[in-house]
Image (cartoon, rainbow, N blue to C red):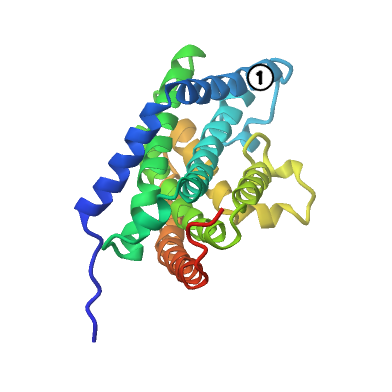
Amino acid sequence: MTAVSLPRRRILGAIVWRDYLTKRSYRLAFAMDVFNGALTLAIYFFISRFIVQPNLAELNDAPSYFAFATCGILVAGMITSGSVELVTRLREEQLGGTLETLAGNPVSTGELCLGLVGFPFSFAVARALVYFVVVSALIGLDLRQASWIGLFLVLLATAAAFAGIAIAAAAAVLVFKRADVFVGLIIGVLVVFSGSVFPLSSLPGWLEPIARVLPPHVAFDGVRNALFRGEGWALDAVALVVIAAVAIPVGAAIFGLGLRAARRSGSLGEY
């Protein structure tokens, strides 16, 4: 029986550090990324000024619609940026001819997958936390009951869950090349219909129960419970960890299949 070896931290760290250095070298792109996030929040801030008396029970006890929407926007941005950046980065590796070299190194499929998702999702979590702190200070939210530990744990669990999903999506890039556009579209639809900027009660009756079991909705609920109630986030975090425990190995297996298929066809370095 072959022993299952854990991914080596040195290998994972090397891939994550490489991606960090690449991200840091494009400073204008980083600045534009921050600007776009701030612009999106500004749009919803002005929209919220017309919503004077929302039903707070439907907003997870958020003090205002803007506070409710801010949580959804930031978590949706974290999910989308981490997932899309992974598949986009993989596509760039193909175009640059470095993916074949990277995959040819003595690393396991699990190490390659975890290394590739390490930086995009770590960066997405860190950026989301900074946004939460800055926005809460700027608009004067009373977060004395908030559980910041709960917020951090829910964001980590969200990143882990969607890292597994993104790994599986990355396999489509290996096989179909231009699948990155469709990955962004699918994730965008999921986060919108999971209650990112409106309560699920606004959806048609037949769609609401489906939306409630979508992973983004679990993440939105966990973050809002941690911030506005200070409790009730633990079950959401556990649910996300369970999703991650299933999605990461399944995603890695799908990625491995895609990698082997691309190697057999000789298309790993094609674009």
Residue appearing at x 53%, y 19% in the figure: 35
**Frontmost residue, 236 versus 107:** 107
User: Residue 260: x percent and y percent?
Assistant: 45, 71
Question: Where on the picture, by quarter, is residue 191?
Answer: top right
**In the displayed structure image, the side of residue 21 where residue 134 appears, left or right:** right
Residue on which the image places disc 1: 43
Question: Where on the picture, by quarter, is residue 19?
Answer: top left
Residue appearing at x 46%, y 60% in the figure: 243
Q: Is residue 86 visible?
A: yes
Residue appearing at x 46%, y 25% in the figure: 30
152 versus 179 height, above or below = above
Q: Amino acid at mark 1?
A: Ile
**Frontmost residue, 71 versus 82:** 82
Q: Is residue 146 visible?
A: no
User: Residue 27: x percent and y percent?
Assistant: 42, 22
**Frontmost residue, 199 versus 157:** 157
269 versus 264 height, above or below = above
Query: Residue at the bottom extreme?
Result: 1
User: Residue 51: x percent and y percent?
Assistant: 72, 21
**In the displayed structure image, the side of residue 267 where residue 153 appears, left or right:** left
User: Residue 125: x percent and y percent?
Assistant: 40, 37
On-image quarter of the N terminus = bottom left
Q: Classify mark 1: residues with Cα within 10 Å, few (<14), some (14-19) or many (20+).
A: few
